[in-house]
Image: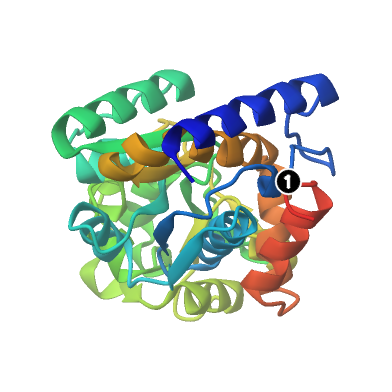
């Protein structure tokens, strides 16, 4: 099928969606079916990082593209941020969901986050296109920022309600200043080193324990070997385990709105269709929706691909 015909079909889809009043919202609202877009001549490679939320987003992307008739290669679950980024820049994958704060701080080397979500998105999108030829599609509204958490029954005893309280704890009761983190968080500028610099303290070296994501939550819940643990604020395990999120009172952690990032060559050829498919999907990914999906995997033991399929079908994105 020629590209002019694809463009014509894309315009017809937009008209049909507007006429039907479809906008893509959470809570089961319909956003238009990906099957109305024809990408049967396209081949894509979809990637993701290797934690639950990224796996779900990866399968949402893969299944939505398959519904358009595209051929899709599965590279979901790459080993962390650097691996996914290098795969995208190197052309090993065509797209994956990245977070605006991660792009701005980690990938583009800025030291200060932009507190306004829209401006953070716009600046990150503009710079990543100019510097790396990567196109950022519409962002989702949820903000999966980092945080530190503590088990509820220890929060009052330790006396830390906000991150600035940790400085006093380290000075007066260093044995209680124990933290469990992932290796990536332990080395990122928007992770533990940057947080310690911003708040003017350092955890004692022997008090930092490195674990995989799931183990961090388990160990923090048990209080062994750590009182505090690195968490993602949209993770369903926070409430399921009874953890208390420590207030980031200096707003150190950047805004992490996710958006599907696509190689410019891919977007130049299929951008209109990709926007039609993923614009409504992004709008539907609000905080409650994403947190509930994460909990279905991490707490209830469901498969990420099944959760992704339910999201797409329940919102009318696939039939």
Task: Tell which of 7 and 225 is nearer to you.
Answer: 7
Q: Is residue 134 left or right of residue 43?
A: left
Q: For mark 1, what is the residue?
A: 288
Q: Position of residue 262 (x, y in %)?
A: 36, 44
Label 1, residues with CA under 10 Å away: few <14, some 14-19, many ≥20: some
Mark 1 element type: helix
Q: Position of residue 134 (x, y in %)?
A: 27, 39
Q: Residue at x 35, y 24 (%)?
A: 114
Q: Quadrant of residue 238?
A: bottom right
Task: Tell which of 12 and 301 is nearer to you.
Answer: 12
Q: Position of residue 267 (x, y in %)?
A: 36, 39
- Using the rendered image of the protein, determine whether residue 81 is visible from the camera's viewpoint: yes
Say if 251 sits above or below 216 in the image. above
Total of numbered circles in the picture? 1
Say if 120 sits above or below 177 in the image. above
- Using the rendered image of the protein, determine whether residue 255 is visible from the camera's viewpoint: no
Q: Is residue 122 left or right of residue 20?
A: left
Q: Residue at x 14, y 33 (%)?
A: 131
Task: Tell which of 50 and 168 is nearer to you.
Answer: 50
Say if 267 sits above or below 68 in the image. above
Q: Position of residue 56 (x, y in %)?
A: 58, 63
Q: Residue at x 74, y 28 (%)?
A: 17
Say if 164 sits above or below 92 in the image. above
């Amino acid at each position: 099928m020629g590209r002019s015909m694809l463009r014509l079909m894309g315009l017809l889809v937009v008209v049909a969606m507007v006429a039907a009043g479809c906008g893509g919202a959470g809570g089961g609202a319909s956003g238009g079916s990906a099957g109305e877009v024809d990408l049967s001549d396209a081949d894509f490679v979809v990637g993701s990082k290797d934690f639950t939320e990224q796996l779900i987003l990866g399968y949402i992307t893969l299944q939505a593209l398959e519904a358009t008739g595209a051929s899709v290669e599965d590279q979901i679950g790459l080993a962390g941020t650097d691996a996914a980024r290098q795969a995208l820049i190197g052309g090993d994958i065509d797209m994956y969901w990245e977070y605006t704060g991660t792009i701005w701080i980690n990938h583009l080397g800025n030291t200060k986050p932009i507190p306004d979500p829209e401006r953070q998105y716009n600046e990150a999108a503009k710079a990543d296109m100019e510097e790396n030829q990567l196109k950022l599609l519409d962002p989702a509204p949820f903000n999966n920022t980092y945080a530190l958490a503590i088990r509820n029954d220890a929060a009052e005893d330790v006396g830390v309600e906000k991150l600035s309280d940790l400085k006093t704890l380290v000075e007066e009761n260093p044995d209680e200043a124990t933290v469990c983190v992932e290796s990536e968080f332990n080395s990122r500028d928007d992770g533990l080193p940057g947080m310690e610099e911003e708040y003017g303290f350092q955890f004692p070296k022997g008090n930092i324990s490195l674990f995989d994501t799931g183990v961090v939550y388990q160990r923090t819940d048990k209080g062994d070997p750590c009182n505090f643990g690195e968490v993602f604020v949209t993770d369903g395990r926070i409430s399921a385990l009874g953890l208390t999120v420590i207030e980031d009172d200096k707003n150190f952690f950047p805004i992490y709105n996710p958006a599907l990032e696509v190689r410019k060559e891919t977007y130049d050829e299929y951008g209109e269709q990709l926007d039609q498919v993923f614009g409504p999907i992004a709008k539907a990914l609000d905080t409650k929706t994403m947190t509930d999906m994460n909990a279905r995997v991490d707490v209830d033991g469901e498969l990420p691909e099944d959760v992704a399929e339910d999201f797409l079908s329940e919102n009318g994105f696939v039939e």
